[in-house]
Image: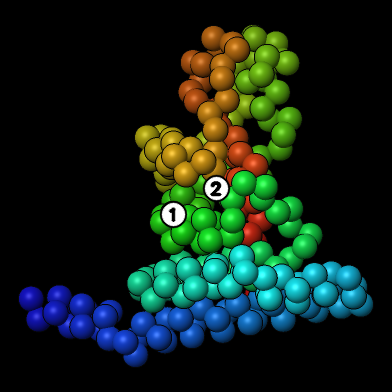
Amino acid sequence: MVAIADSLREHFLNRNRYERIVETFQVFKSEIEAMEKECAGDRERLDAIYNYTKSPEFAEAVVAAAEEAARSTNTKKIKRLAVALANSCDPSIEPSDSDDLTSFIHDVSQLSEGDIQILGKLASTPAMAFQFAQGSQKASQPESPFQWIFDNAQREKLLTNDFYSYCFRLVGFGLAAEIPHNSPSVAAAGPVFRLTNRGRRLAALLNQRT
């Protein structure tokens, strides 16, 4: 009980909450500086980065990121909040037509390590991997187009049910969608997923520079 009380006191002390916010914006600063070096000489891109940091949407997301960081003790999650905030300033990342940055910040705070891992795997899936699921390859092809990701997941000791549960969790966040089966042989191989535009946007926001 003493250990529990100490943990709760440590978590809710204003000093510690503030330090987590400071940690978030230290990472943000490093990411922005790396981005500025990356686009050195590109005045248009640099101006776009600077102008976005003055936008109401960014200001709202900053507050949301600070609130989420103050509540979290997960250093990886705190860093991801900062990375997403920094990448939102990059005009080379396609903006979302329907979701504001704050909604992505809240998603980052709620996604587990497994969710993030599978999000990255889906983001790296070649588009052609889904052609078979859409019926463009012969039905006699025995291997699922999703199999190469699943094999990779198995190598990392993710159980079948865990792997698919992460995929369905991403569906629940609107970050992924299950691809309809047009072939019985594909259906037998198990569900096939792809990232939605929203999912690809979040995956791009989570790319680290530092």
Q: Residue 91, located in which quarter of the rendered image?
A: bottom right
Task: Establish if 150 lies above or below 19.
Answer: above
Residue at numbered disc 1: 111
Q: Residue at x 63, y 20 (%)?
A: 133
Q: Amino acid at mark 2?
A: Leu
Q: Position of residue 161 (x, y in %)?
A: 37, 35
Q: Secondary structure at mark 1?
A: loop
The N terminus sits in image quarter: bottom left
Q: Report crowding for label 2: few under 14, some 14 to 19, many 20 or more residues within 10 A (C-alpha).
A: many
Drawn side of residue 127 relative to residue 107, left or right: right
Instruction: Identify the disc placed on residue 155.
Output: none
Q: Which badge, 2 or 1, comes first in the chain's sequence?
A: 1
Q: Position of residue 207 (x, y in %)?
A: 65, 62
Q: Is residue 30 visible?
A: yes
The C terminus sits in image quarter: bottom right
Task: Establish if 173 lies above or below 15.
Answer: above
Residue at numbered disc 2: 119
